[in-house]
Image (tube, helix red, strand yellow):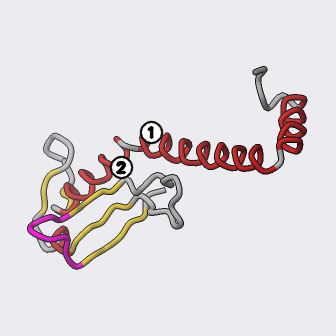
Amino acid sequence: GVELIRVASLGDRTAGEFSVGDGGSQGAATRKKPSLKLADLAFKSDDVQFFGGGPGSPTVPATFQVILHEVGHAVELEQFRLAGEGYAKASAELDAARKLLKGDPVKFEAERQEAQRKGKLGEF
């Protein structure tokens, strides 16, 4: 669910950047998706580094470290992003129910009873 974006520059000497997006913020007209940006700087070096251990360790491009570091942020914050998206969805559903209750209480009560009958609501 993370958009990979290649950019010319991120400013300063920043080679990579992860953003959690807005989690589908409440009231947002458009959603800003999570993104992982990699600048040209991340790919400038032709250096290699050793990966693994022992004499037979393969070499990988130096960009491997930048990419792995930013992917680590994405993995680290995945549960946070999913919780934010769930919260935004639940908030939107709550807002819709409030509007229905305010506009047509009889229809709201009928839909609430139907949902409860189907087991989608607990007792309240």
Is 12 magenta? The answer is: yes
Please give the name of the residue rendered at 52% of the width and 47% of the height, measured from the top-left corner.
Answer: 85
Q: Residue at x 76, y 23 (%)?
A: 122
* Number of the label disc, if any, that sits on residue 74: 2
- Which disc number belongs to residue 11? none
Task: Please rate how many residues cluster around mark 1, counting C-alpha atoms within 10 Å: few if below 14, some from 14 to 19, many from 20.
Answer: few
Q: Residue furthest top?
A: 123
Quadrant hosting residue 87? top right
Label whose residue precedes the other's in the sequence (2 or 1): 2
10 Å crowding of disc 2: few (<14), some (14-19), many (20+) = many
Dot 1 falls on a residue whose secondary structure is helix
Q: Is residue 118 left or right of residue 60?
A: right
Which amino acid is tagged 2? Ala
In contact (CB < 8 Å): disc 2 and disc 1: no
Q: CA distance from mark 2 to mark 1?
A: 10 Å
Residue positioned 88% across, 41% down in the render = 106
The residue beneath circle 1 is 79
Q: Residue at x 42, y 40 (%)?
A: 80
Q: Nearer the viewer, residue 52 or 10?
A: 10
Q: Which residue is at the front of the view, 73 or 114?
A: 114
Q: Nearer the viewer, residue 1 or 44?
A: 1
- On the rendered structure, is 8 left or right of 4? left
Q: Can you give x and y, in whole percent of width and height, for residue 45 in the image?
A: 11, 70
Residue 118 location (% of width, % of height): 88, 32
